[in-house]
Amino acid sequence: MDNEKVIILDFGSQYTQLIARRVRELNIYSEIHPYNKDINLDNSVKAIILSGSPFSVRDKNCPKPLFDILKLHIPVLAICYGAQFLANFNGGEVLPSKIREYGRANLSSLSARSILFKNFSQNSQVWMSHGDTITKLPEKFELLASTKEVNIAAYKVKEKDIYGLQFHPEVYHSKDGQKLISNFLIDICKFSQDWTPDSFVESTINKLKQKIGKDKVVLGLSGGVDSSVAAVLLDKAIGSNLYCIFVDNGLLRKNEFENVLNQYKGMGLNVKGVDAKDEFYNVLKNISEPEKKRKAIGAKFIDVFDSEAGLINDVKWLAQGTIYPDVIESVSATGGPSATIKSHHNVGGLPEFMKLKIVEPLNLLFKDEVRRIGKALKIDDSILSRHPFPGPGLAIRILGEITEEKVKILQEVDHIFISSLKEENLYDKVWQAGAMFLPVQSVGVMGDERTYENVVSLRAVESTDGMTADWVHLPYDFLSKVSNDIINKVHGVNRVVYDISSKPPATIEWE
């Protein structure tokens, strides 16, 4: 990247990605790096943020950066563990907290002259999450803020733009948290805030032109946001040399294959639809175990995709809609970096198998940023606002063995549910919704007849990134109408339930 950037040094915090998102909300580019890997601190790096961590600075083998933070000549914001680390290893003292310092707190005193706390409200609420606390600051550190229970809630290294916080400004519970991040990056670091969707589109298209030249590229479309935005970016860069393949695995939503295919063609994309339903149904026969289903679908997708790509002469590149959370080297529970690359449809084993070079135009972006890029590219909102849909499709929403009959039933149920959400203007208020086909039957009465038919569960959640999610409190009248419509219109279903589990402990999907 040519933009000014913030390096976020990750010590394993659950909030590290959230820090990166908060920075980017200010139109400033950020990168996450494991604490124990070399980093090129070139002139583009204008600030460093140290993350929190599940570890303690008092541990013998606690995580340590590979360079001396205090010797840096660029501003630093150290959060929670990062703040404790700087204090502890520069002459201060960090001890176990006498009380549990977790949850909401209020800043009872602030340094009025500190730029970091400019325009903060009185008794501003912050979010604490730590088992240790800084009890003594090093000689060259000065106190900036306290809470009722935490004397050293924020500090500054004298004569340097290095700041430490024992609270988390990146979480929404810290009411002035984004203001603090803005004060640090804009007022102290002097970022120009030039990382915008339009600038990303322009620079990415130019880089794709230089990287690919006149080579041919093949891309597997899914109908989702990521692959669609990747396709349009590539189309603007290389035009007819982009070959898109959209596979119908028989596990899509009702009419989705035809509708999405027509939509893509209306966008001017060079796209081929492949009807492979029967092939997928055949490999899924007699398979009930969730992971085996995923692997069977993934293997068959590779087979179909490779066969279709082989019909295109001289293809050199495989394009993927990989996004930033898929490629971040996160810090594992043991403190080491662990690559977290998705393996389904994005496309596990496929690159080596096909011996193609990889191009990933979105691998610097979070999901919400992909949508903003899509808007800058004027992609239709029906694609950009589409709920996430699992790679294995309805296969992981049908518990147990997959049959064509079950798929058709679930497609009808799902269609009624999703259409009803749209009709009642509830679709955009939900992050993800769908229906599950349960491996049970129940007794019912329809007319004067006793029935013994299938049970389906409806699921709707709200979330920001899918890592955590809460069930949506859909109106009872709405749920009643949807249930009635499903039972009356879908032959084979006599009972509808609504899933009110949150993630964690449950997952969004059932398999």
Image (spheres, rainbow, N blue to C red):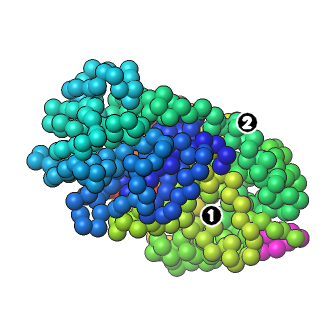
Residue 340 lies within the magenta run: no
Instruction: Describe residue 165's horizontal placement relative to residue 4 as left or right.
Output: left
The image shows residue 174 at horizontal and vertical percentages of: 33, 34
Residue located 25% across and 37% down the image: 153
Task: Residue at 76%, 51% (x, y): give it.
Answer: 207
Q: Residue at x 60, y 32 (%)?
A: 192
> Left or right: 276 with respect to 37?
right
Front in this rendered view, residue 154 or 353: 154
State the extent of the magenta-drawn residues as a range.
307-313
* Residue type of the residue flagged with mark 1: Asn
Label drawn at residue 346:
1
Label 2, residues with CA under 10 Å away: few <14, some 14-19, many ≥20: few
Residue type at mark 2: give it. Answer: Lys
- The answer to whether residue 240 shows anywhere in this view is yes
Residue named by callout 2: 378
The residue shown at (29%, 67%) is 61
